[in-house]
Amino acid sequence: MTRRTPLGRAARCARVAIPVGFLALFFAWPLGAIFARSLRAGALVDVVTDPVLRRVAWFTLWQAVVSTALTLAVGLPAAYVVARYDFPGRRAFRAFVTVPFVLPTVVVATAFLALLRPGGPLEFLHWQRGIAPMLVAHVFFNVAVVVRTVGGFWANLDPRREEAARMLGASRFRAFRHVTVPLLAPAIAAAASIVFLFTFTSFGVALLLADPAHATLEVEIYRQAVELFDLRTAAALALLQIVAVLAVLFALARVQERRAVAQRLVGAADSARRPRGRERFVVGAILGVTTLFLGGPLAVLVWRSLHVGAHWSLGSFRALGSSASASTLFVSPWAAVRNSVEFAAIATAIALVVGGMASVVIAARPGRATRTMDAFLMLPLGTSAVTVGFGFLLAFEHAPSGLATSPFLVPIAHAVVAVPFVIRAVVPALRSIDPRLRDAATMLGAAPRRVWREVDLPITARAFAVAAGFCAAVSLGEFGATLFIARPDWPTVPIAIQRFLARPGEINVDQALAMSVILMLLTVVVVFAIERVRVRDLGEL
Amino acid sequence: MKRVLILTIAAVTLAAACGSSSKPAAKPETSPTTTPARITTVRLLTHSSFAVSKAVLADFTKQTGYKVKLVQPGDAGLVVNEAILRKDNPVADAMFGVDTTFLTRALDAGIFDAYEAHGLETVPASLQADAQHRVTPIDRSSVCVDFDKSWFDHNGRPPAPASLDDLVDPRYKNLTVVENASTSSPGLAFLMATVVAKGDGGWAAYWRALRKNGVRVDDDWTAAYQTDFTAGGASGDRPIVVSYGSDPAADVVYSDPHRATPKVGVIASTCFGQTEFAGVLHGAHNVAGARALVDFLLTRRFQEDMPLQMYVNPVVRGATLPAVFTKWAVDPAHPLSIDPATISAKRSDWIKEWTNLVVR
């Protein structure tokens, strides 16, 4: 046990107070404000007993569960390959899988439809709009969560445990099933909880690829709040959504807590090796299929951005430079990129500090109190954006003038969404640290801060890097929250894309595609750069 | 549990304290909304489709000394609701973009203060929907059924559609995409067009027939036009779409490679007319600036800028339109229309019935 000093107690207190206060101020308070105004028992009863809304709730739940399962099925093999094998372009591959995660839904939907439509390369599937393309799109967007969260943790698992099992005669599968899977369970549950939240609150994908008959709760809340202005129904539905999300989060948090075991983690470089013999075929197949699945729609977008009419041309990119000057609506691509990068940097910094502190608390003291805190910090991912947006207006009504429309709120909103990623990536790593390591350091005279720096930080550095990459991606691709606080003079790249698409004509579509390609490149560059950070002891990440 | 609650409250107080001291320092680039001497900024709450030439906006600043700060949180419906939620302490001074469908909701909530704008005498009386001048008409537009002319030019295909009835003709099966009336403003406008054209007793049957004829319903304009319309974003397979009467003009302006004639046509008899209004928000900090801005929206400088910025028609008499706009934009003299009070009374019922008919 570390020494109890007043300073230590204050630090512990801050580690709870800062994350909880941050979320309370920028999430719980706004939510409370809208609930206080609009939540009525009568509306709750109406919502729960309305057969149509019950059907919507049921659909929302099962499609999220199925989407999560499919995303794990597609993501885990790729996570395995990037964690266990060293191959050329491995880091680029990890950056590449993040790209779908940041792209605006409407752009991806266009690419999907181009592939599936008559005349497209996947015409033979005969897919109409509906549930199947919606589920596939959910997998497409969220594979990165699994590959990065699980892959990051997997890379630090000591492969010798599995090798020992094999030496003792276990088959490859048996060793995997009885040694690796239990050790991985917390990371898998962590990834599953994020994918579940994303798909449970799916808005754009549901609108574009399913038909309107398959609306999610999120869509229904938007419809009630905006078009019908029935805030009571909207608030009741939002509460229902929160209850469902909390139930799932608690269940998954328990899995993560119970299955967590202290173990010796190793550097990523030590656990990965070149594939040998038949492995080469398996690794190649997994990489190939994943790349094809994620790269197909992306390739369509790149190809189309490089065409004007039926000819190869850089015209779309050139047009970006020229249309910025005339109208308040358009912005130069460089300004949008600059805004996006600045917001991403601030959001990542906030999320790492807030999420890092929360992770330390959550990992150190399992129990109901921290589980509550954990679920609370995850909740923003599972809450209707329009509800929080309206709540924001009410909560900050009497704040200093201009606060509700301050551009500084944009990275804060991004950070609120990004904090859960930090927690999900860092907590499994922290929990796996053998406490005896810390005890040994303490015994040798290290102060708590030094123990953290010398023991915890090096071991969790990789998790922090994974989290930072994610925070940047969340911020680069975030659209919903940004829209509600939108300062039109600070548009991000996704907002610029949306503005182009809001007008007819090829020039606008072409520019939206060119901007999307810029967003892809930006994501790869930023994530790649973050992953290049070297951390001593564990070497290159 | 109780400890968590106490901790939460303490943390909020703490964070709020830090917040209030650090926030002003964190945003030095943004212009302060108030200065002790004189208010120099006027804030305009509007929807995300609002656009104006930068030069025109600069003229307003030159003439009045006020800089315009735009607040654009989303589509027209969302903006009206936000204004209502913040009625007592508005996020802006003036608002632009309340259309016919949301007008009564806005007026009933009392978000506007009366102001008779300069230049109102140049606006036809038929467009001035509020006798108390709480809102001022700024532009007109129409939501119409559009079609891809080149698609219908091919041999073996039916002629281009010419009426609402054609859309339920089996020859046009699986060719139409519309927007969801419960999530999209052109979608609602088209629903109302069918209510006027087919009457209270007939519109439900019309939609049943449309559904039988394979109508696709998308949730917003971007999805319908850019992903499903054949003349939109290039991956579409539906040559008939609910969109705007001005689209042919935009189609020429934004063509690439350049074309002199649009590939989009409009069925003029399906057009539903809408007016967009502006007003001074109740409780505005800068009332003088808000009034000056509403006046400015009615000047010829702004009115003549609108057509190629937002693809809408000016409301003041004598405004000169760009040639490409007069030549191609479809602007029927007597579009289908419903008065705002009727819309307000019935929209909820229409939307609910429509939803049950078409998308459940």
Image (cartoon, coloured by chain):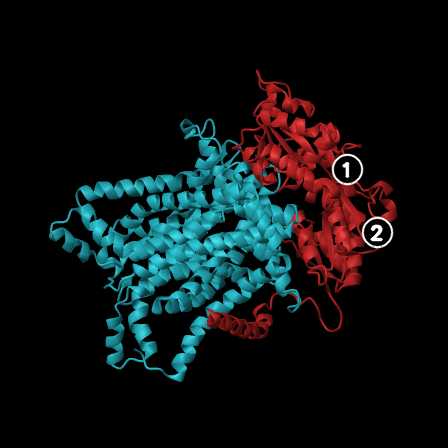
Chain colours: A cyan, B red
Q: Is residue B173 above or below residue A367?
A: above
Residue B134: % across, % down = 81, 53
Residue A484 in the image: state x and y as whole percent.
Answer: 59, 55
Q: Residue B338 carries which label?
A: 1
Q: Residue furthest top?
A: B156
Q: Which of B100 and A343 is in front in this view?
A: B100
Tell me if A85 is positioned left or right of A418 in this view. left
Residue B31 position by quadrant: bottom right
Distance (Cα) linking label 1 and label 2: 20 Å
- Tell me the SS state at disc 1: loop
Which quadrant does the C terminus of chain A fall into?
bottom left
Which residue is disc 2 drawn over?
A: B133
Residue at x 45%, y 75% (from the top left corner): A14
| Residue type at numbered disc 2 | His
Q: In which quarter of the image is residue A437?
A: bottom left
10 Å neighbourhood of mark 1: few (<14), some, or many (≥20)? some
